[in-house]
Image (cartoon, coloured by chain):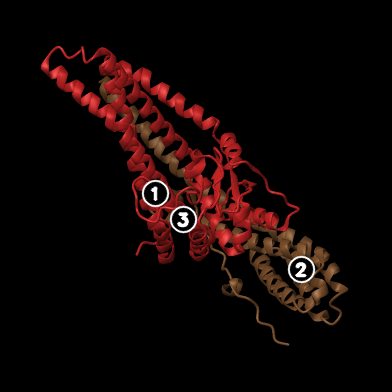
Amino acid sequence: MIGIILLVVVILLLVIAFVAYYYNKIIRLENRIDNSWAQIDVQLKRRADLIPNLVESVKGYMKHEKGVLENVTKARTSLMNAKTPRENIDADNQLTGALKTLFAVAENYPALKANENFLQLQDELTHTEDKISYARQHYNDSVLAFNNSIETFPGRTFAQRMGKKERQMLEIPVEARETPKISF
Amino acid sequence: MMTVEDQIRKNKQDTLFVCIFMLLLLFGVIFAFGFAIGLPPIIAMLIGLPLSILYVLASYSFSVQSVISAAKARPANPKKRDEKLFMYKVEEMAIAAGLPVPKAYVQNSSDINAFATGKKPEDAIICVTTGALQKLNSEELEGVMGHEMSHIMDRDILIATVTVGVVGAIALISEILLRSFLWSGGGRGKNKSGGLLIVIAILFAVLAPLFSRLAYLFISRRREYLADANGAYLTRNPEGLARALKKIKADLPDDPKGSRTVAPLYIANPFKRSLRNSIWSTHPPIDERIRRLSQM
């Protein structure tokens, strides 16, 4: 009799441990997605903050490139006003393109290229851009891990009961690693 | 062809398998020891196991500081452009891995090398040589940082310290065991079966340190492949690390700095560049690593 009670208790404990493990795993993976979005957001803000300094230091040198600078400022404004993740990413892609053109054009201004302040800003903006793309990559890795956990057995049964749905990945622009082509 | 994910899974399985083998060896020497001093095996186990765990923990808790001082490393200086760019790369890889940003350290040496240390991701350190900062371009440095970040992510520092600790414990117990046999002059062998057991125990005491050392080296090489694969997964660019390894291969070490105990930690062994597959080396041959990376 005691043997049977003991067996039942052990089985119950195992079931509880099993449920807790999968419940926690799904919650943990979902939190990781939200956390990695926050990381992207931080980097986007940081990037927007750097732009005014860059425009300021470049303005004096690039008198004939008004359009280039305007594009950068415009992209920054739409990044500041972006509300949904989709808008954020679109505005950021726009800003990446505008900055690429600006840095390519800067190659024609030796005085600007020798400017310590400009160089530092360029390094830091490139760094922020890299951080954003790695943060996006980590976001997608997190989404993949989460989606895998709720689509495969036994996570699937738990996810259905917990009302968890598949998450969407961010699309990474294909041209992100290519160098810009500028014609004069 | 294996995908990155397949390589990662296989390397993890191998590590687990060899770790279990090492633990069995440790149990074996403790048993043999218990037998030699006439203790029941259970008692020997109860005394021996906590002692070996304590030994491992002690070496683990002193590991970070001793590594940094053995390598004569200093924190990176953000005022210098190349060191600043290195700090940037460390931060980017930490973001890609979703881990806290490790501290960036620099070691003065004309060699191209790097290592990671730290007990857990929160207090990890990534160190590069000044030679690496001068000779590697941004993409190659990124590949190396991805490799080091993977060591932190997979807690290789923990695995390395624990396995070194187990190797040390096995060597220590076997040593005592052999000496106790010498002193007692095999006096315990009153009957034939006892004599045979003693021969087996002596043989075991001689062979266990050797096997545990080989098992440790095997794990070390596996973890290097694993860090290469994981690093390529982080940067999504195996080519960068492959090119860095080619540069390391072409740039043979001239003036190795740091102690030999730190050598297994580096991305490439600073003392000896094994070009052939050897069971005695801490790192796999560079050519084989480059080949595996180019297949990804």
- Label 1, label 2: how many angstroms apart (C-alpha)? 47 Å
Dot 2: few (<14), some (14–19), or many (≥20) neighbours within 10 Å? many
**Residue B275 coordinates in the image, percent (x, y):** 39, 56
* Residue at left offset 82%, top offset 67%: A115
In the image, A43 versus B79, the foreground residue is B79
| Mark 2 chain | A
On screen, residue B22 versus residue B262, left or right, reads left
The image shows a total of numbered marks equal to 3
On screen, residue A84 versus residue B242, left or right, reads right
**In this view, B60 is above or below B15:** above
The circle on residue B276 is: none
**Residue A101 coordinates in the image, percent (x, y):** 72, 77
The circle on residue B228 is: 3
- Label 3, label 1: how many angstroms apart (C-alpha)? 10 Å
Q: Amino acid at mark 1?
A: Arg
Toward the bottom, the furthest residue is: A184
